[in-house]
């Protein structure tokens, strides 16, 4: 490979949430962290060069995205996803979760119902709860191999709860589904029929494995584009979470204006210049790096898959179609959700995300972060094998 993903870059004593704050989160200091969704890989060279150039200039005054930034956005989504987007419909925010909260505040009132599909990224529920809205759950269906959508339940929950806002996770975190066109079209048809606006969180859209294709929700039709907000960011793709830059695409002029007004009411006007430079450089020059990263992650998936097959048959990898966050079924260990969480921390010495963080239907599952050098993944799997052997 042209790019190095094998070298272990020390992250301790860098103010890393993942590595430096175990005790703050109630974990022992010797756990191997494979939880929060950032990667242990350096961002692409072009991004580091752009940040170094900006730092070298030494002036960090108020800044705005320019034409080259918007051109980079448009080109990235056109070439990677076949989505011809008007960059003028974009709004820059400090992150996708920040945008979720703003959109919830703009599109609903306190007490209104917002629908999610559990198990799902826990900040969906937190964003709804923290803004005094009602969480409505339509659970995904697990058939023992993969997750699908219960469309009848989805529509029934909308009708029964007078839902006007749905947060779609695409690709889905944590179950790893890359939704197919017919699935997205059926969701869209139900939402349009019942006047439900869709927030499409597509932050993992660049992580799709061979044989699958991420379809931007707004690309389905103009009518759908007018009834959704597509939330994107370079943060997951290029490991830029701390630079707090997201691009939210809202075709409806009225809603986009309301979002900008709400941002202003919170005192947010200009985005982070380092984040803007990093995003532009990543989208302009990061494609080859990303292609090789996905190839490397596919190798990590192969290692995990084969380890489970040959040494850990008690664990089941829910085969991911996208994301770098495999969802693992641990039901055969026969442990309750709290017992499983303690087992992973105390016996396996691994810090993972327990399944119930993502909703009640996540009981018995754990989410792994495999965006690490392969030697680190081998160490994690060895710890897990040793711990499971002790209780088997």
Image: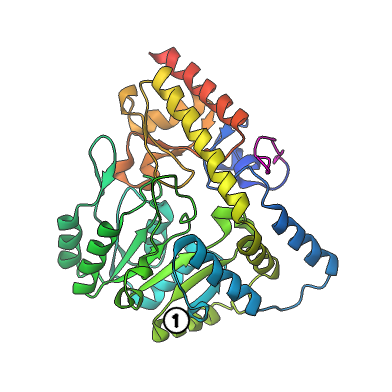
* Left or right relative to 356: residue 76: right
33 or 56: nearer the viewer: 56
* Left or right relative to 279: residue 328: left
In the image, residue 183 sits, relative to residue 65, either above or below, namely: above
| Mark 1 neighbour class, 10 Å CA radius: few under 14, some 14 to 19, many 20 or more | many
Dot 1: element: helix
- Residues shaded magenta: 1-12
How many numbered marks, from 0 up? 1
Q: Quadrant of the C terminus?
A: top left
Residue on which disc 1 sits:
256
Residue 155: image location, x then y, percent = 17, 62
- In magenta stretch: residue 244: no
Residue 282: image location, x then y, percent = 63, 60
Residue 176: image location, x then y, percent = 39, 45
**Residue 287 sits in quarter:** bottom right
Observer able to see residue 98: no
* Left or right relative to 284: residue 127: left
Observer able to see residue 20: yes
At x 41%, y 79%, the residue is 251
**Residue 349 sits in quarter:** top right
Q: Quadrant of the N terminus?
A: top right
Residue 97: image location, x then y, percent = 48, 62
In the image, residue 188 sits, relative to residue 242, either above or below, namely: below
At x 76%, y 58%, the residue is 49
At x 53%, y 22%, the residue is 383
Magenta segment, principal secondary structure?
loop
In the image, residue 364 sits, relative to residue 210, either above or below, namely: above
- In magenta stretch: residue 5: yes
Query: How was the colour assigned to the protein in this rendering?
Result: rainbow
């Amino acid at each position: 490979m042209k790019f190095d993903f094998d070298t272990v870059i020390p992250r301790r004593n860098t103010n890393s949430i993942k590595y430096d704050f175990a005790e703050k989160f109630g974990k022992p200091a010797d756990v191997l962290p494979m939880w929060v969704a950032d990667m242990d890989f350096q961002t692409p060279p072009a991004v580091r060069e752009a940040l170094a150039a900006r730092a070298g200039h030494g002036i960090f005054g108020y800044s705005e995205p320019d034409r080259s930034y918007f051109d980079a956005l448009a080109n990235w989504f056109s070439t990677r996803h076949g989505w011809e987007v008007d960059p003028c419909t974009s709004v820059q925010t400090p992150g996708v979760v920040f945008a979720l909260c703003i959109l919830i505040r703009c599109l609903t009132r306190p007490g209104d119902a917002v629908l999610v599909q559990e198990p799902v990224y826990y900040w969906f529920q937190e964003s709804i709860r923290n803004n005094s809205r009602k969480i409505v759950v339509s659970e995904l269906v697990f058939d023992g191999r993969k997750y699908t959508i219960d469309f009848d339940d989805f529509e029934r929950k909308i009708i029964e709860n007078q839902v006007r806002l749905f947060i779609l996770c695409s690709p889905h975190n944590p179950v790893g589904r890359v939704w197919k066109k017919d699935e997205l079209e059926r969701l869209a048809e139900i939402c349009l029929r019942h006047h439900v606006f869709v927030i499409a969180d597509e932050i993992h859209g660049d992580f799709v494995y061979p044989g699958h294709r991420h379809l931007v929700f707004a690309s389905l039709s103009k009518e759908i584009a007018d009834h959704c907000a597509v939330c994107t960011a370079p943060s997951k793709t290029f490991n830029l979470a701390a630079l707090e830059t997201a691009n939210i695409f809202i075709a409806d002029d009225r809603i986009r204006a309301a979002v900008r007004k709400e941002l202003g009411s919170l005192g947010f006007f200009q985005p982070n210049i380092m984040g803007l430079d990093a995003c532009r450089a990543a989208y302009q020059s990061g494609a080859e790096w990303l292609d090789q990263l996905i190839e490397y992650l596919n190798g990590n998936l192969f290692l995990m898959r084969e380890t489970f097959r040959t040494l850990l048959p008690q664990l089941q990898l829910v085969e991911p179609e996208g994301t770098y966050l495999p969802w693992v079924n641990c039901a055969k260990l026969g442990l309750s959700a709290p017992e499983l969480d303690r087992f992973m921390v105390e016996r396996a010495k691994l810090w993972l995300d327990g399944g119930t963080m993502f909703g009640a239907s996540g009981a018995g599952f754990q989410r792994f972060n495999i965006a690490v050098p392969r030697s680190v993944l081998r160490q994690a799997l060895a710890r897990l094998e040793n711990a499971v052997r002790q209780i088997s």
